[in-house]
Image: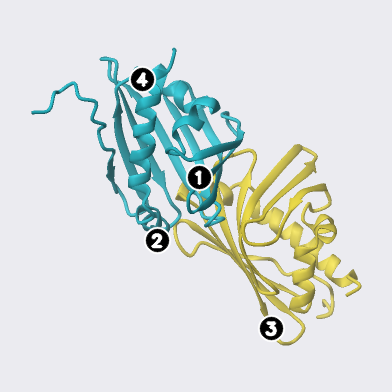
Chain colours: A cyan, B yellow
């Protein structure tokens, strides 16, 4: 019998609401302010985004028009990711573009909201919009879901340890 | 009576093939290699892209994955434009993203082809794909068509004077 208090990480719910979108939903066992800080502080991002891989944050300017660029040093090589912020509304919403160096010029828009569930938990919902269905499907088949779950499990750990 | 040799510039044909696209077609009275050079040489771009306004080319890396960033100094202020190259195939095709600083994170993909018409003229066709119809319509209503025609008239002038 598994204790209900066992720290099993929930899986992200990944769905496709339209033929150019991916929707991700995930509950975090931490208040919204803390989840926000873990997602917007480069020193903290570096602890979970790369799922154990070294992550170099070359640029992170979380405000309208600001740019971001992360470089992940993985077993299979070095992967750059970058984009630009369209909207940053603490502690509830970030809209930003997302582009992987391996497919330059293929740009998704990630619209993330954090909902305060009122019981110390937070619901994250991200809608990613692609220019084409093919690009959307390419992302779905890239191992994105597994990678996302690994990142969010690492984020769970970080959220438990954060001093604030 | 107007002489058929009068140097009246043709207008670009602007159409909307789908609800997220803008198609631009324009004939240039110059061979394809010359049009290509005028579009890919930063020193030449600075002579026509800004339609008489000062243009600062901060970055121009025309190869897969390279970035570009132009800053136009216009009467109404300073406007930055930037993006990334998806494909550069001389002298016939460039696919690149396009983003205006005034609407950061709203990204169009411009797919430009140059067709050699075999009589010393070149047909340019650009298909711009937007994430949403609203973004497409915003571009259409931004004065884009007038600006485009001014740029292409300036390019006509440059093409006549180019030493190669």
Chain letter of disc 4 in the image: A
Question: Where is mark 2, residue-wise?
Answer: A134
Question: Where is mark 4, residue-wise?
Answer: A160
Binning the other alpha carbons within 10 Å of mark 2 as few (below 14), some (14 to 19) or many (20 upward) gives few
Nearer the camera: disc 3 or disc 4: 4
On screen, B30 above or below B108?
A: below
Q: CA distance from mark 1 to mark 4?
A: 28 Å
Snapshot quadrant of residue B9 = bottom right
Quarter placement of the N terminus of chain B: bottom right
Callouts 2 and 3 on one subunit = no
Binning the other alpha carbons within 10 Å of mark 3 as few (below 14), some (14 to 19) or many (20 upward) gives some
Whether residue B29 can be seen here: no
Question: Where is mark 3, residue-wise?
Answer: B117
Give the side of residue B132 with respect to residue B139, left or right.
left
The location of residue A46, given as percent across then percent down, is: 51, 32
Secondary structure state at the residue bearing disc 4: helix
Nearer the camera: disc 3 or disc 1: 1
Give the side of residue A67 with respect to residue B154, left or right.
left
Secondary structure state at the residue bearing disc 2: helix
Circles 2 and 1, Cβ within 8 Å, touching? The answer is no
Q: Reading the chain from its start, which is encountered first: label 2 or label 4?
A: 2
Q: CA distance from mark 3 to mark 1?
A: 38 Å
Nearer the camera: disc 1 or disc 4: 4
On screen, A90 above or below A83?
A: above
């Amino acid at each position: 019998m598994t204790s209900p208090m066992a720290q099993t990480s929930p899986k992200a719910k990944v769905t496709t609401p339209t033929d150019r979108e991916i929707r991700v939903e995930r509950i975090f066992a931490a208040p919204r302010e803390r989840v926000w800080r873990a997602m917007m502080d480069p020193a903290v991002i570096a602890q979970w985004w790369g799922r154990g891989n070294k992550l170099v944050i070359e640029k992170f300017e979380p405000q309208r028009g600001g740019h971001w660029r992360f470089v992940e040093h993985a077993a299979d090589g070095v992967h750059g990711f970058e984009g630009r912020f369209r909207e940053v509304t603490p502690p509830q919403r970030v809209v930003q573009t997302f582009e992987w160096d391996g497919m330059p010029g293929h740009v998704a828009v990630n619209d993330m909201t954090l909902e305060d569930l009122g019981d110390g938990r937070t619901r994250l919902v991200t809608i990613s919009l692609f220019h084409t269905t093919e690009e959307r499907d390419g992302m779905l088949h890239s191992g994105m879901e597994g990678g996302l779950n690994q990142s969010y499990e690492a984020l769970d750990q970080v959220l438990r340890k954060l001093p604030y």
